[in-house]
Amino acid sequence: MNSVNTKLIAIAGMSCSGKTTLANRVANRLDAPVISLDSYYLPLDEFTFEERLRFNFDDPSLVDSNLLIQQLAAIQRGETIDHPTYDFVEFTRGQESIRVEPSEWLILEGQYALLWPELRDLCAAKVYISAPDEICLDRRLRRDTVSRGRTASEVHWRFTNHVLPMVDRHMRPTKAYADLVLSGEDLPESLEAAVLEHCELIAR
């Protein structure tokens, strides 16, 4: 067991608001591992591929929040974890896991990174990144058609019928829990600097 006191930075915001880019930039500066909340979707192995296609993956009930919180708490106790991965082409949990060791800082990024009270209780820093819906849709179109095998019409349909209703119901209200609110339209360098300055204050 490691004696490092790991401080958790949670970065929340709409899909394609800039969370992942920000998380990776901050991680490079802090030498911190990054965990994506998307890795914790439920396996859904009991369903056929066609049935899995009908699930709304923007519904937070499809996230294995219990496992997520258990593993984050384990890291803060000084334990090493093997967190799951997710296959977004097949809509099921990946075969491999990723080992994460305790470190001074740990970053969790995901749409619902500030949703569960038990998760928020583990956070040293709670960041919310906001961006206009049309910008998030444009970014999601480029991402999902290139790396996730989706068609443009499917991305538009999911954004309108899955993303926006869940974001309005579950994600936007979590902005109230953030201690740092940023705009996804700002330059990545500015966002990175703001988070690093916030972390400096926490570390004092």
Image (tube, rainbow, N blue to C red):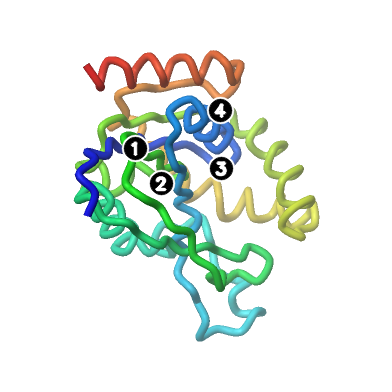
**Residue type, mark 2 in image:** Tyr
The residue where tag 1 is placed is 174
Given contact means CB atoms under 8 Å apart, are the residues at marks 1 and 2 in contact?
A: yes
Upstream in sequence: badge 3 or badge 2: 3
- The residue carrying pointer 1 sits among few (fewer than 14), some (14 to 19) or many (20 or more) residues within 10 Å by Cα, namely some
Secondary structure beneath label 3: loop
- The residue carrying pointer 3 sits among few (fewer than 14), some (14 to 19) or many (20 or more) residues within 10 Å by Cα, namely many
Q: Is residue 12 above or below residue 182?
A: below
Upstream in sequence: badge 1 or badge 3: 3
The location of residue 193, given as percent across then percent down, is 47, 15
Q: Is residue 149 above or below residue 196?
A: below
**Residue type, mark 1 in image:** Thr
Give the camera-side residue of 16 and 133. Answer: 16
Q: Is residue 135 above or below residue 16?
A: above
The residue where tag 3 is placed is 15
- The label number, if any, that marks residue 131 in the structure image: 4
The residue where tag 2 is placed is 112
Upstream in sequence: badge 1 or badge 4: 4
